[in-house]
Amino acid sequence: MRMGESVEWGLHCCVTLGWLRDQGPVSIRRLAAWFDLPQEYLKKRLQALVRAGILTSSPGVRGGWSLARPPEQITVMDVVTALEGAEEAFRCAEIRLRGESGRGGGAEFARPCGIAGLMRRAELAWRRELAAHTIADLMEGSPAGAERTRRNYQDMTG
Amino acid sequence: MRMGESVEWGLHCCVTLGWLRDQGPVSIRRLAAWFDLPQEYLKKRLQALVRAGILTSSPGVRGGWSLARPPEQITVMDVVTALEGAEEAFRCAEIRLRGESGRGGGAEFARPCGIAGLMRRAELAWRRELAAHTIADLMEGSPAGAERTRRNYQDMTG
């Protein structure tokens, strides 16, 4: 089980755009150069965050990318869901109903499968943790990162 | 992010072999027919559980598959790890160190990244939940399943 690399990209871009939100939109060229990422592929992945209402992008010379809402209102779960989808990692195909196993289940099979239930509870524990933290929390957790980001962006654009 | 279908297969096979453990080993032909699964592919996946010390398999007419240790000593995490690997789902490539972002980080970069830390805590919450439950718990959670399984296996083999 593996998340796409764009989860790291998306979270770092959101935190960076949070730190730079008084600088106006950031161009995709600069965002890609910021983390040394492939520009077109980064753009494609960030468009998923636009569709989810997490980022906005505007065209033109002074256009670029910025957070669509305050970083306090963007959870880490929001970003992960936008990039990885909302489906559960464990897919239950109800194999208990099939073959020899499935004969004579009757009322028993009206109850949810204990295996699926446990897998769901584990994923809920994971989701709860990610939903309890926002982009603002990540920004506050790294004051040195905020300072470095603003300084390096000044050097890049000044 | 998606788990392989064999996680459902592996967990159901372990629970079923737990319920049938006084019946001797179960052949791969019967296990596959039990859940209407492709026999060769199921065998390949179950061999990962043998390598992890969760199942044993023995050759011959009276051979077959059984739990390698008591169901109380097999956690759901053990089975998931054997089938999906022990790596974390979130891979941190430390992109914060690259490009313009990485300039002048110094002592800051000696500290773990807050994003990677949060993703790790969330996965730990998931792992804790799966490690807290055993195959025996799943067996006990479904007394009707135990009864159905023993009855249907009797019909199949009798």
Image: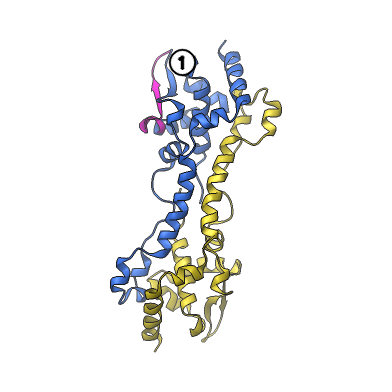
Chain colours: A blue, B yellow
Locate residue B94, reporting x and y percent.
Answer: 61, 35
Residues B97 and A28: in front is B97
- Taking the magenta stretch, the answer to whether it contains residue A55 is yes
For residue B58, side relative to residue B108 (left or right):
left
Check disc 1 and report the residue beneath it.
A24
For residue A47, side relative to residue B78 (left or right):
left
Q: Can see residue B138?
A: yes
- Taking the magenta stretch, the answer to whether it contains residue A129 is no
Q: Quadrant of residue A69?
A: top left
Q: Which residues are magenta?
A: A49-61
Residues B142 and B38: in front is B142
Chain containing the residue with disc 1: A
Q: Can see residue A38?
A: no
Locate residue A7, reporting x and y percent.
Answer: 50, 38
Q: Residue at x 49, y 27 (%)?
A: A39
Please tell me whether residue A56 is drawn above or below residue A128 in the rendered image: above
Q: Quadrant of residue A93?
A: bottom left
- Mark 1 neighbour density, 10 Å: few (under 14) some (14–19) many (20 or more): few
Locate residue B45, reporting x and y percent.
Answer: 51, 65
